[in-house]
Image (cartoon, rainbow, N blue to C red):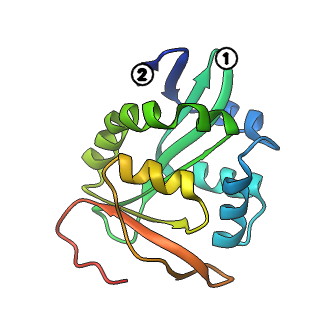
Amino acid sequence: MIHGRMKDVRIVAAGREHLAPLHGRLRRSDCNEVLVATGLAPEAGLERSFALSSLVWAVLREDEVIALFGVGAGRRTDTGSPWMLGTDALNDMARGFAIHSLRYIGLMRHRYPYLENWVDARNHASIRWLRRCGFTVEKAAPFGPFGLPFHNFHMGGGHVHHT
């Protein structure tokens, strides 16, 4: 099992038992993003992200699940789609969590040299976290079933990126 520590926070390999504690507790920005990106309810989006991922971790504060994050296969064999959904507790530790996240981003890139996904343009906290972690965040463009502004974000080389 992969573990990490940050003050009173632990990061562990996630299992299905880490999903239910997040139901009804996700940040409003994450709930909105899941809905406008996929058309799914937040819990369905969380379940889908978990099911489609090859690597998933749970962020625990004491024994409370405060976030899940992971990566699933992208459009190409060398491309992974990273994601994170969490509670408001993440907002209190954003800077420290970004620094701590670099280890897990490295594990994602070991499996998928190129990481790429989309983030709701209104989700300012997530955009700051992505930039702190070293992702390139592109100019917003229409995305999802409602065509709302999203930023493509990516990390790694070897791809020609079009926005």
Please say if 125 is above or below 123. Answer: above
The circle drawn on residue 4 is 2
Q: Position of residue 43 (x, y in %)?
A: 76, 52
User: Counting residues from the N terminus, which is met first, the one under dot 2 or under dot 1?
Assistant: 2
Name the residue furthest right: 24
Q: Position of residue 88 (x, y in %)?
A: 69, 39
> Could you tell me if the residues under marks 2 and 1 are in contact, i.e. CB atoms within 8 Å?
no
Q: Nearer the viewer, residue 109 or 132?
A: 132
Quadrant location, the N terminus = top left
Q: Quadrant of residue 59?
A: top right
Q: CA distance from mark 2 to mark 1?
A: 14 Å
Please say if 160 is above or below 46. Answer: below
Q: Secondary structure at mark 1?
A: loop
The circle drawn on residue 63 is 1
Q: Nearer the viewer, residue 155 or 74?
A: 155
Quadrant location, the C terminus = bottom left
Q: Residues within 10 Å of mark 2 (few under 14, many from 20)?
A: some
Identified at 52% across, 43% down, the residue is 69
Relative to 120, 130 lies left or right: left
Q: Secondary structure at mark 2?
A: strand
Identified at 30% across, 54% down, the residue is 112
Amino acid at circle 2:
Gly
Q: Quadrant of residue 143?
A: bottom right
Please say if 53 is above or below 18. Answer: below
The circle drawn on residue 124 is none
Amino acid at circle 1:
Asp
